[in-house]
Structures are given as C-alpha cells and as structure tokens.
Image (cartoon, grey):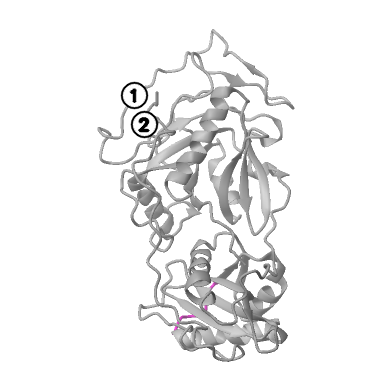
C-alpha cells in the first residue's frame, strides 16, 4: 500500500500500525512507540498516479525517521509529506531501460593520423549557438591506443552537458603537462567559438594538479566531480565507435588511471537533516523541479536527460529519490549545494544510504533500522533506479508535508569508464 504525501509518492514501510519514533542515542536501532497522549498520526488518503491531479505536485514518502546523534537519519514508518502514490516501488516502472542514444559519426583517430597532431575531424564544433555554454566537462587521459613509439596515446575530450559542444584532440605521452592543456583549452574556444567557461568539471582525481593549474591560469574554476555523466556516456560511445576500429587499438590494455572511491565518512554537521524518506516522483514532476532549479528558484543541480539517453522515458515513469526534511532547510540546502553530488545508493550490509560527492568522496548519509520489511524496501528503491536508467534525486525541504523544496538535485548511477 502506498500513500499520497504532498507532491511525492511513498509507501508506508518498515512497520505497520502507529508510527515509530527514533530516540536520539548513539545507536540508531532503539525505537519506541509514540507517547499515547500525543496527537495521533493522521490517516493518509490513498491516491493512484492514474487519477492524481494534473499539477503533478504530488509525491509520496516512504520511510521517514527522526534524526539520531551524529546526524544519522533512522528509518521509521512514513508520515505525511509532499510526495504521490502508486502501486509499489518494487513493480516495473512501466518502461524498459532506455535505449542507447544513437551514436553520431565520430571519426576521431579513425584516419590513423599522427597522434601528436590535432585530429580536425574530432574537433567537432557544433553548429548550435554555444554562447550560453558556461560549464564544460573534461577528460585528459591515456587511451587504449599505441603510437609509433609503442607508447600510450593521450586524448583531451571536452563537451558540455547537452553535447552541443564536442572537442577531441590526441597528444603523445611526453607532452602531458598543464601548459599543453592550457594551450589546448584555448584551441577549444577558437575552434568551436564557445566562450570561456566559468567551470570545468573533471572526474579523474589523478589529473587534478594538471587540470587545476591549466584552468586557474585561464581564470576558470576547476571542479572535481563525478557529475560528468554526459562525458562518461560519450567516452563509452567512443570506445566502440572510435578506439576499437583503430589498428593500434590495445584490447587488453589496463586503465592507466583507476577510479577509486574513498572509504565512507561520517556526515558533517552542516549536512544533517531531521527526517528522511524514500520517495518517488513522476518524470513530469521531475521536469517541473528542473525548471525551478534552472530558474534559480531554489538550490540544486540538474542533468540533461536527452544527452544521458533518457529522453525516451514517458512522463508517468516513476523516478525514485530521497527527501530530507529539516527546520533549517535553507542553510541545509545551501551547504548541500556546495558539494558536487553524484549519486545515492543503499549499503545493505550497514543498513544505510551512501552519498557520493566530488571525484571520490563517500558519506554515510542516512541509516534505517534493519528488518525484513526495511531491507525489502531498500532493495525495491534500488530496483526502481535501475528501471529508469539509474536516474534518481535528492530533495531538501522544511517539512515532508510541504509542497515546495528548498533544494533539488537530479542524480544518476553512472558506470565508470572502461579505461
């Protein structure tokens, strides 16, 4: 059974009967029934997504809990919030995993030209207006290709979140430094007509020194981030369409720079909420929140669904997420916005949610009390993510019953690059 809770959709989870409240303690598994003299929880009206109002301001909360010590959120049964209802998160979302985006013809490197020169076919300036492209995604790393010296070929890839901007250039391994990269960034602007960006995101921690030096020399902010989802998708396409067809392709070449996540850390005080809930929202509602973020009406960050290959998702596809409530919602959203949020995932062994940020940081974001029902709910939430291509979200609001969010982040589980 699911319940309508404001704009989001949620099912009562973990416990049947009265809502259980988590007492603040160093252990989050201590739950007691609420005070009998306290006002009883309101009964929530059921609502299906089929007959929900067209405003899409409905969502339903699944697993709220009071905050314990150390800022961890405990699991409890859902109370009312802003989120809508459907049959079950464990059900199929009504859409298959989105088909892969049609690969564009990409001749980078296919001519077999000297890797030390710019491959003009790869330096593809979009015919679209790039005047509003102020944030780039960048990768500067070796590829599974060998040059005439038997050394790894390096490549610079630059794109924006919509892939209107795309640029590729090969380099020999003996020219990898910040000065080379700085000159290449200037060539990107010259070749494409794109303005100097305000930010450049990159996902390889090992390249932070070179990329940061080149960017800051050009008065561009370098941002270590796993939110390079468009770039990662492009890299995956190039592996098959470009690198594999080269005569100098090395199929078994190990990645030169491995991506390694750090051990989970405790959540800082500034990022702690007071309640949290597993929730879900129709894609139509997601699009509304994206518009509000882009308009600057609230804190947050969004992604380009088309560039991610998710444009085929229907408007009624249910996207899972996590809603966090706090009486200090505005500062909480502001502090959260300072992070480069990448994804949320369940760690069933620890009965908690892990938040990935930056290029390798992981935080123990929320906890729930272990039970068969709670574990099943967490698995259903993860399955719901898979059903919509890894898409999910984090919402911050003052109260789970309110309509409006103070922060909204669209996230995706992205596979690491193959090299």
Q: Position of residue 71 (x, y in %)?
A: 67, 36
Task: Please tell me whether residue 409 is drawn above or below residue 20 in the rendered image.
Answer: below
Q: Position of residue 359 (x, y in %)?
A: 65, 59
Q: Residue under label 1, please give it.
A: 46
Residue 183 is labelled as: none
Pointer 2: residues within 10 angstroms few (<14), some, or many (20+)? many
- Tag 1–tag 2 contact (CB < 8 Å): yes
* Mark before the other along the chain sequence, 1 or 2: 1
| SS label for mark 2 | loop
> Is 209 contained in the magenta span?
no
Could you tell whether 209 is left or right of 311 in the image?
right
- Residue drawn at x 58%, y 13% is 33
- Residue drawn at x 48%, y 41% is 321
Could you tell whether 270 is left or right of 39 in the image?
right
In the rendered structure, which segment of residues is drawn in magenta?
A: 193-198
Which image quarter is the N terminus in? Answer: top left
Q: Position of residue 217 (x, y in %)?
A: 66, 81
Pointer 1: residues within 10 angstroms few (<14), some, or many (20+)? some
Task: Please tell me whether residue 285 is drawn above or below residue 197 in the rendered image.
Answer: above
Tag count in the figure? Answer: 2
Residue 401, visible in the rendered structure: no
Q: Residue under label 2, please give it.
A: 85
Q: Position of residue 404 (x, y in %)?
A: 41, 41
């Amino acid at each position: 059974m699911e319940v309508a809770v404001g704009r989001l959709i949620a099912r009562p989870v973990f416990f049947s009967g009265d809502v259980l409240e988590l007492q603040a303690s160093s252990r989050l598994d201590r739950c007691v029934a609420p005070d009998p003299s306290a006002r009883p929880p309101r009964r929530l009206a059921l609502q299906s997504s089929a007959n929900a109002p067209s405003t899409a301001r409905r969502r339903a909360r699944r697993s709220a809990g009071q905050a314990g010590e150390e800022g961890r959120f405990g699991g409890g049964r859902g109370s009312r919030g802003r989120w809508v209802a459907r049959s079950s998160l464990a059900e199929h979302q009504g859409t298959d995993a989105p088909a892969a985006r049609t690969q564009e013809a990409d001749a980078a490197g296919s001519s077999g030209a000297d890797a030390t020169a710019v491959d003009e076919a790869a330096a593809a300036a979009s015919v679209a207006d790039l005047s509003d492209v102020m944030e780039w995604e960048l990768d500067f790393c070796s590829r599974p290709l060998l040059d005439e010296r038997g050394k790894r070929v390096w490549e610079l890839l630059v794109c924006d979140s919509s892939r209107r901007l795309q640029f590729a250039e090969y380099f020999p391994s003996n020219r990898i430094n910040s000065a080379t990269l700085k000159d290449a960034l200037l060539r990107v602007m010259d070749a494409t007509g794109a303005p100097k960006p305000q930010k450049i995101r990159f996902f390889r921690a090992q390249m932070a020194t070179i990329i940061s030096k080149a960017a800051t020399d050009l008065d561009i902010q370098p941002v270590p981030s796993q939110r390079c989802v468009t770039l990662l998708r492009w890299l995956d396409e190039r592996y098959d369409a470009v690198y594999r067809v080269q005569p100098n392709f090395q199929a078994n070449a190990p990645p030169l720079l491995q991506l390694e996540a750090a051990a989970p850390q405790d959540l800082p005080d500034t990022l702690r909420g007071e309640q949290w809930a597993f929730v879900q929202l129709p894609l139509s509602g997601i699009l509304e929140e994206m518009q509000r973020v882009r308009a600057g009406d609230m804190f947050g960050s969004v992604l380009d669904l088309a560039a991610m290959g998710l444009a085929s998702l229907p408007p009624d596809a249910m996207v899972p997420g996590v809603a966090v409530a706090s009486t200090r919602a505005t500062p909480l959203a502001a502090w959260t916005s300072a992070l480069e949020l990448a994804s949320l995932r369940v760690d069933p062994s620890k009965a908690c949610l892990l938040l990935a940020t930056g290029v390798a940081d992981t935080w123990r974001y929320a906890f729930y009390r272990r039970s068969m029902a709670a574990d099943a709910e967490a698995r259903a939430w993860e399955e719901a993510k898979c059903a919509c291509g890894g898409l999910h979200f984090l919402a911050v609001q003052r109260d789970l019953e309110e309509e409006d969010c103070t922060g909204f982040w669209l996230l995706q589980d992205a596979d690491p690059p193959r090299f």
